[in-house]
Image (spheres, rainbow, N blue to C red):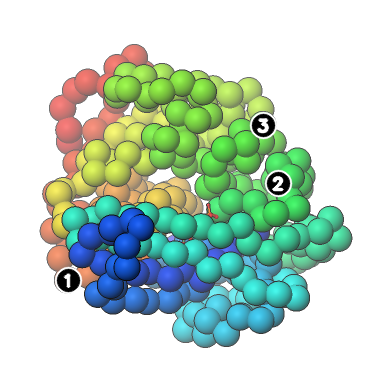
Amino acid sequence: MSRSCKVLTISPNPAIDLSVALDSLQPGTVNRATSMQMMAAGKGVNMARVLVSLGHQVTVSGFLGIDNEAPFIEAFAALGVEDDFLRLPGATRINTKLSEAEGRVTDINAPGLAIDQRSWDDLIKRVEQQLQSPLRRPDAVMIGGSLPPGVAVEALAELIRCIRQHDLPVWVDTSGDALAAAVEAGASAVKPNREELSEWAATPLLDDDATSCAAQALSDRGHDHGGLAHTLVSLGAQGVLWLARHGRWDSRPPEVKVTNTVCAGDTLFAAMLHAVLTDMSPEDGLRLATALSAEAVRHPGVGDIHANDFHHLLEHTRVRRLSDAATGGAFV
Ligand SMILES: O=P(O)(O)OC[C@H]1O[C@](O)(CO)[C@@H](O)[C@@H]1O
């Protein structure tokens, strides 16, 4: 049993995910679903699920609308996490995920509840209270997802700087201007996928070398701002590229039947934080996170470490250490 840590996850813009399974999506026609499922979600909530399954004590925070908070309250009770979400009038957004039999997923993510400056200031105060409390102070903070309407990227930067001033690592999974702002504000780790990295680099990433160069540029930019100990690039079935201060690795999961990719990235990021907090070897940590993320794509929701064949997935996940100059070499 590895060490249990305290983690705070913050979801400025959580969501109820409506996962709709269909044989194949025919836009502009009536489509019949084969199944439907609703789940309290958003990146911070999903990451909390993974961290709890890996044995950590988690507090969840962010903003929830009081009109439809029930699925969140149920989920938090089932998980055994501390609920520190601020409540606001209105409803939390519903994000629709259309997953086709062949594994393609179409996301329709709503904008979310508008947040005013006062509410954002309240969130920062609430977070600071936890960071200052000797009993509740976390070992790390994760911030996940898009920014809700009314929240500018400068506000995210302020939150990150506040957490860094308390000398805590802050892992941020976001995209677009918010990703750039997070890096400049000193985020400790980020996890763009290829498209998000391409947007940050403002260039198409047509091959592995271009992806690797852009990841290095992002990592260097983070170092210049005193943060980014970890840059993780999630590459879907191709695996993960990981640039850390102490080396570079990549990984490749075994082939799995893809049913729903929605929570793969959240699973990967949270499992990597677990690996770092519990001092796993880089190879074992990246193998675990990659395998768990592969497990996640087989169904809606996050990866399940208790899946019957998880050991098989783990054994068939390849990890290799990369030299500083190259991406070649044999998988170990
Ligand atoms: O905040 P964003 O970028 O709209 O993403 C939210 C979505 O991301 C997820 O957390 C999956 O990564 C979904 O549960 C959720 O609907």
- Left or right: where does residue 305 sit relative to residue 193? left
Q: Secondary structure at mark 1?
A: loop
Residue 156 numbered mark, or none: 2
Picture mark count = 3
Amino acid type of the residue that numbered disc 2 sits on in the rendered structure: Leu
Q: Residue at x 66, y 81 (%)?
A: 67
- Residue 69, horizontal then vertical, whole percent: 61, 80
Quadrant (top left, top right, bottom left, bottom right) of the N terminus: bottom left
- Residue 68, horizontal then vertical, whole percent: 61, 80
Nearest to N terminus: mark 2 or mark 3 = 2
For marks 2 and 3, give the CA distance. Answer: 11 Å
Q: Residue at x 17, y 71 (%)?
A: 308
- Left or right: where does residue 116 sit relative to residue 291? right
Query: Which residue occupies the foreground of this view, 134 or 231?
Result: 231
Would you identify the image quadrant in which residue 85 lies? bottom right
Q: Secondary structure at mark 3?
A: helix
State the residue position of label 1: 308
Quadrant (top left, top right, bottom left, bottom right) of the C terminus: top left
Amino acid type of the residue that numbered disc 3 sits on in the rendered structure: Glu
- Residue 319, horizontal then vertical, whole percent: 23, 39
For marks 1 and 3, give the CA distance. Answer: 42 Å
Amino acid type of the residue that numbered disc 1 sits on in the rendered structure: Asn
Query: Which residue occupies the foreground of this view, 103 or 252?
Result: 103
Nearest to N terminus: mark 1 or mark 2 = 2
Residue 203 numbered mark, or none: none
Question: Is residue 207 positioned above or below 313 on the image?
Answer: above
State the residue position of label 3: 184
Label 2: few (<14), some or many (≥20) within 10 Å? Answer: many
Q: Can residue 272 be seen from the camera position used here?
A: yes
